[in-house]
Image (cartoon, helix red, strand yellow):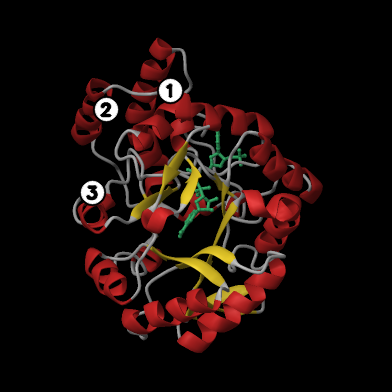
């Protein structure tokens, strides 16, 4: 696995591991907690060095899992986590990026992650009630004290990135980006290129859709976030399958898998892009990590782009409630 460099010189494996699904978001876990620790450690064996979690995943238990799994190799890996919510009775109940809350979360995350520094600390969603200058200032203070190494933002607008970066240099922006979620291309990616900030696409496999393993019509289980997302509604899902079929054809012609095409497409966009596919299965780790070797030519990328533009996407990437939180 080769490495890539995000902003401010943060070097990570070209493909990371998203750990959220081990604790929430994709329905019942096919494995036990011990098996999830095994998956995370198997990722390290495959030279994956970039691990993504958040206070709110679980909440709390995902950070605890990641902390336990990575404790033996702490110095060899980069752990990213996120602040920005009020959490009550095991549920997020709205945004909170006030400086005192950021510090409280950092202290608690450090304990759960069993470490003395958070490598990359993202604001999970921009909080309209707290000026981004105050957020950047608060994270900057934690960085000066050594509790945090790098500052990140998730789902911000280009204007917010600019303002934050002027107060304290941003290392990475994490937003949804994949063959069917192109929102960052208009303003965010050009801004990152200009400012020298890295980009971490979340849900890079389209929440599993581009792997070709999502049934065309079966309902999702309880606790599977896809059951709340318009583009996964039965009619939209069926219409969106045309692009998945094309990805599969391209994959077959190259002797790789659909997941590898979806990830290789992201890697081909910019050398400072580092996707974090999520999986709870060791065999899929191998497959996803293998995308780092499945290079796509400029023609392949252009063909996929043209096809995606022609087919369009049916349905929004979030329901209305969640859409209100992004791009601020
Ligand atoms: N900043 C944010 O707001 C935000 C939001 C969402 C996610 N994230 C981060 O981004 C990470 C990745 O996003 P994501 O998990 O939502 O979506 P994703 O990586 O696009 O897709 C995950 C889904 O794909 C399946 N999958 C993974 N590899 C596969 C393969 N090779 N073949 C077939 N199926 C495969 C997984 O199932 P199995 O687990 O069963 O393999 C899971 O259902 C998360 O873990 C989280 O850390 C951040």
Cβ atoms under marks 1 and 3 closer than 8 Å: no
Secondary structure under the numbered disc 1 in the rendered image: loop
Q: Which residue is mark 2?
A: 301
Q: Which residue is mark 1?
A: 294
Secondary structure under the numbered disc 3 in the rendered image: helix
- The answer to whether residue 136 is left or right of residue 73 is left
Q: x and y percent of residue 201 in the render?
A: 40, 48
Q: x and y percent of residue 261 in the render?
A: 41, 27
Residue 259 versus residue 72 in the image, above or below? above
> What's the CA distance linking mark 1 and mark 3?
23 Å
Tell which circle, 1 or 2, labels the residue nearer the N-terminal end.
Answer: 1
Q: Residues within 10 Å of mark 1 (few under 14, many from 20)?
A: some
Residue nearest the observer in this picture, 295 or 305: 295
- The reply to whether residue 316 is visible in this rendering is yes
In this view, the residue farthest toward the bottom is 100
Can you tell which mark lies on residue 185?
3
Question: Residue at the location (22% across, 21% down)?
Answer: 299
Q: Residues within 10 Å of mark 2 (few under 14, many from 20)?
A: some
Question: Residue at the location (27% across, 55% down)?
Answer: 192
Give the tally of numbered discs.
3
Q: x and y percent of residue 129 in the render?
A: 36, 86
Tell which circle, 1 or 3, labels the residue nearer the N-terminal end.
Answer: 3
Secondary structure under the numbered disc 2 in the rendered image: helix
Question: Residue at the location (40% across, 38% down)?
Answer: 237
> What's the CA distance linking mark 3 and mark 2?
14 Å
- The reply to whether residue 318 is visible in this rendering is no
Indicate which label's residue lies in the foreground, 1 or 2: 1
Dividing the image into 4 quarters, which one contains the C terminus? bottom left
Q: x and y percent of residue 205 in the render?
A: 45, 39
- The answer to whether residue 29 is left or right of residue 148 is right
């Amino acid at each position: 696995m080769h490495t890539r460099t995000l902003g401010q010189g943060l070097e990570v494996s070209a493909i990371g591991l998203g750990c959220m699904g081990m604790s929430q978001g994709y329905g019942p876990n096919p494995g036990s907690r011990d098996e999830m620790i095994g998956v995370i450690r198997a990722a390290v064996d495959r030279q994956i060095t970039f691990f993504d979690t958040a206070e709110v995943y679980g909440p709390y238990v995902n950070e605890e899992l990641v902390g336990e799994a990575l404790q033996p190799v702490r110095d060899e890996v980069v752990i990213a986590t996120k602040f920005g919510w009020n959490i009550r009775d095991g549920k997020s109940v709205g945004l909170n990026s006030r400086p005192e809350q950021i510090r409280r979360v950092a202290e608690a995350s450090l304990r759960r992650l069993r470490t003395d520094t958070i490598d990359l600390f993202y604001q999970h969603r921009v909080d309209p009630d707290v000026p981004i200058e105050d957020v950047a200032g608060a994270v900057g203070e934690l960085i000066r004290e050594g509790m945090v190494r790098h500052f990140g933002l998730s789902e911000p607008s280009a204007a917010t990135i600019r303002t934050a970066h002027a107060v304290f240099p941003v290392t990475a922006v994490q937003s949804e980006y994949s063959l069917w979620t192109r929102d960052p291309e208009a303003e965010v990616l050009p801004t990152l290129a200009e400012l020298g900030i890295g980009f971490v696409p979340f849900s890079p496999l389209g929440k599993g859709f581009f792997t070709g393993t999502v049934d065309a019509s079966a309902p999702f289980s309880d606790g599977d976030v896809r059951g709340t997302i318009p583009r996964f509604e039965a009619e939209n899902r069926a219409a969106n399958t045309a692009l998945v079929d094309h990805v599969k054809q391209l994959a077959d012609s190259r002797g790789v898998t659909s997941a590898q095409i979806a990830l290789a497409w992201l890697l081909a966009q910019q050398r400072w892009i580092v996707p974090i596919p999520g999986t709870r299965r060791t065999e899929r780790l191998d497959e996803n990590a293998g995308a780092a070797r499945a290079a796509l030519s400029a023609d392949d990328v252009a063909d996929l782009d043209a096809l995606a533009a022609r087919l369009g996407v049916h349905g929004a990437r979030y329901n209305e409630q969640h859409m209100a939180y992004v791009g601020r």
